[in-house]
Amino acid sequence: MRTIRAISFHDIEQNRPLIIVSPNGIKLLFLPLKNYLIIIMSNEAYEIDQYNADNHMGKLPVRVLSFTYVEWFLKIYPSFIEEFETEVQLFALKDYITYTIDEKKIESVAELTPNKNITIFETYNQFLWNINYSLIVVYDEGFHKPSINKTFQGNIIPNNLIDEAITLFFYAMSLISEYSKWPNYNLPNPEKYSHKRKQYIENCNGSFVASMTFILLHEFAHQYYGHIDSYPKSNNESKQLELDADDFAFDYMSKQFAGPKGKTMQLGIITGLASLVLLDSSLRGGSEHPDPDFRLKRMIEKMELSDIDNIWGIASFAFILWGKYYSKVISLPKILEDSKTLFYKIIDKMSFLKLNG
Ligand SMILES: [Zn+2]
């Protein structure tokens, strides 16, 4: 059997694609569309440096995780690789994933192109990593820990970790309207970091990689179902195809829910959809996509989580940060109930805001 496993890069200077094969045999085609300089703004010594110039193409620190999510995707369950190969051999799916390095603002999350190439974008990747980090840290430091300690009184009390997470959040949000270089390697990032940030960064890496696995499976579903072979007849049909692709990705990831990566997989699905909620103030999916809050609610309900699962709380914080950024008042209750109740209170508020602006 032929091995597929690919991602590709494009070397603009040489004007040729650059295909990198990782030690575990996964190929990536990287597609840089502009020249760049890497500027490391700090001379601090980092105890942990994941960067490897031979493997890690890209301009933002999220570049060090590209092989990891391709591997999680292809190994979502043991025989998935054969399904991928069948699509390649019989239905013209490209046998590589294109990682686009274009130094542009977020223009797309991911695509299955008309020539059947699953394509992802570095700017959105970094956005998604930062959203994962800020949701996890602001929830844990600002709400979960104070709730356990019974010191929570309805407000998030800032600390150094929360300040950094909010800085990362605002950098991520800035990428929606304008591209800029990674601001500072002293801020938490997956590439260079110290032991004191290791735990949150590596937790975030897990949920980010799971989010990207969900996105790759969603794009693969469009291929598997032949969605790009015919035009949807209506907006409603188009939206239904998106929900079908979400369900496909969910079902494949759920094969691991009972395993060691189960919670990470569940969290990644939710933070991935939360990132779509944050992309604009409208909570509308437009003519082709269902509303992102609806997609998130649909997936979290399918997980059958316990009432106190932190994933409800982290999902709630997506809407709290959304409100903070787009100047909508979404307040936290002073008296804490379980995190599922918090989620539904916030969802009700969001429905009200959608109806009343
Ligand atoms: Zn889609």
Image (cartoon, rainbow, N blue to C red):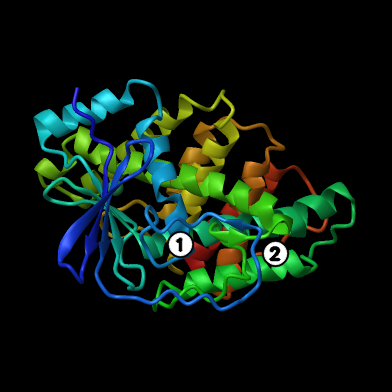
User: Which residue corresponds to the image point at 31% horizontal and 37% vertical from the top-left?
Assistant: 244
Neighbours of disc 1 within 10 Å: few (<14), some (14-19), many (20+): many
User: Which residue corresponds to the image point at 37% horizontal and 63% vertical from the top-left?
Assistant: 58
Q: Position of residue 91 (x, y in %)?
A: 11, 33
Q: Is mark 1 within 8 Å of ligand 1?
A: no
Mark yes or no: residue 329 visible.
no
Residue 156 falls left or right of residue 311: right
- Quadrant location of residue 184? bottom right
Q: Position of residue 356 (x, y in %)?
A: 50, 68
Of discs 2 and 1, which sits in the foreground? 1
- Quadrant location of residue 346? bottom right
| Viewer-proximal residue among 23 and 138 | 23
Q: CA distance from mark 2 to mark 1?
A: 28 Å
Residue 72 falls left or right of residue 328: left
Q: Which residue is mark 1?
A: 126
Labels 2 & 1 near each other (Cβ < 8 A): no
Picture mark count:
2
> Under tag 1, what secondary structure?
helix
| Viewer-proximal residue among 324 and 256 | 256
Q: Is mark 2 within 8 Å of ligand 1?
A: no
Identify whether 184 is placed above or below 25: below
Q: Position of residue 72 (x, y in %)?
A: 42, 36
User: Which residue corresponds to the image point at 34% horizontal and 43% vertical from the top-left?
Assistant: 216
Residue 73 falls left or right of residue 145: left
User: Which residue corresponds to the image point at 17% horizontal and 31% vertical from the top-left?
Assistant: 87
Residue type beneath disc 1: Gln
Mark identifier at residue 331: 2
| Viewer-proximal residue among 331 and 93 | 93
